[in-house]
Image (cartoon, rainbow, N blue to C red):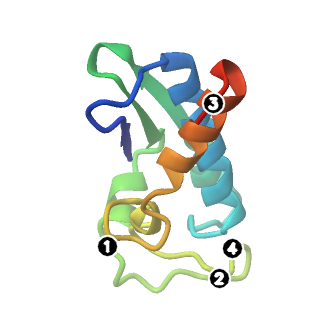
Amino acid sequence: MKIVLPPGVLYDQALLDTTAQLLLGEIIDEQVIPKDVGTLEASHHVAPHPEERRADINAATPYARRLYMHPEYDFRQGENRNAKGRWFEDWEPGGREAGRAAQIYAALWAKKYGGK
């Protein structure tokens, strides 16, 4: 999942990385990542890309992409009640939480620099 600042938004890579970490925490709290023993969920991490003014949330397991790209799989929901494929979709454009990264970034910016 790529977290990119919209054009015109003032840039602070540390805040963008913190935004990604907080967003990842919310995604984990929503229990949408398929979970058996927790390896997939625990493998998610933030990868900063300052040269592109973005931060990515990635999974470091060889099977993550296969599971993500196949929402038709029958995911067990014993450990994570909302487990599904495409677990980032609610936070991507068009999803129910699409503006959440921008909200987090704006709140962090206001806390660090003041104002809105």
Residue 34, quarter of the rendered image: bottom right
> What's the distance in space between the residues labelled 1 and 4, CA to CA?
17 Å
On the image, the x and y values in percent for residue 100 come to 52, 55
Q: Looking at this view, name the residue that lies furthest to the front.
A: 115
- Residue 24, compared with residue 86, is above or below; it is above
* Residue wearing tag 3: 115
State left or right for residue 29 relative to residue 34: right
**Numbered label attached to residue 59:** none
> Dot 1, how many residues are within 10 Å of its Cα: few (below 14), some (14-19), or many (20+)?
few
The reply to whether callout 3 and callout 2 are in contact (CB within 8 Å) is: no
Callout 1 secondary element: loop
Of badges 3 and 1, the one in the foreground is: 3
Residue 104, quarter of the rendered image: top right
In the rendered structure, which disc, 3 or 2, sits on the residue that comes first in sequence? 2
Which residue sits at x=58%, y=36%? 116
**Numbered label attached to residue 70:** 1
* Residue wearing tag 4: 80
On the image, the x and y values in percent for residue 111 come to 71, 29
* Residue wearing tag 2: 77
Indicate the amino acid at tag 3.
Answer: Gly
> Dot 4, how many residues are within 10 Å of its Cα: few (below 14), some (14-19), or many (20+)?
some
> What's the distance in space between the residues labelled 2 and 4, CA to CA?
5 Å
Callout 2 secondary element: loop
The reply to whether callout 1 and callout 2 are in contact (CB within 8 Å) is: no
The reply to whether callout 2 and callout 4 are in contact (CB within 8 Å) is: yes
Which residue sits at x=45%, y=41%? 58
Which residue sits at x=63%, y=30%? 115
> What's the distance in space between the residues labelled 3 and 2, CA to CA?
42 Å
Callout 3 secondary element: loop
> Dot 2, how many residues are within 10 Å of its Cα: few (below 14), some (14-19), or many (20+)?
some
- Residue 96, compared with residue 40, is above or below; it is below
> What's the distance in space between the residues labelled 3 and 4, CA to CA?
38 Å
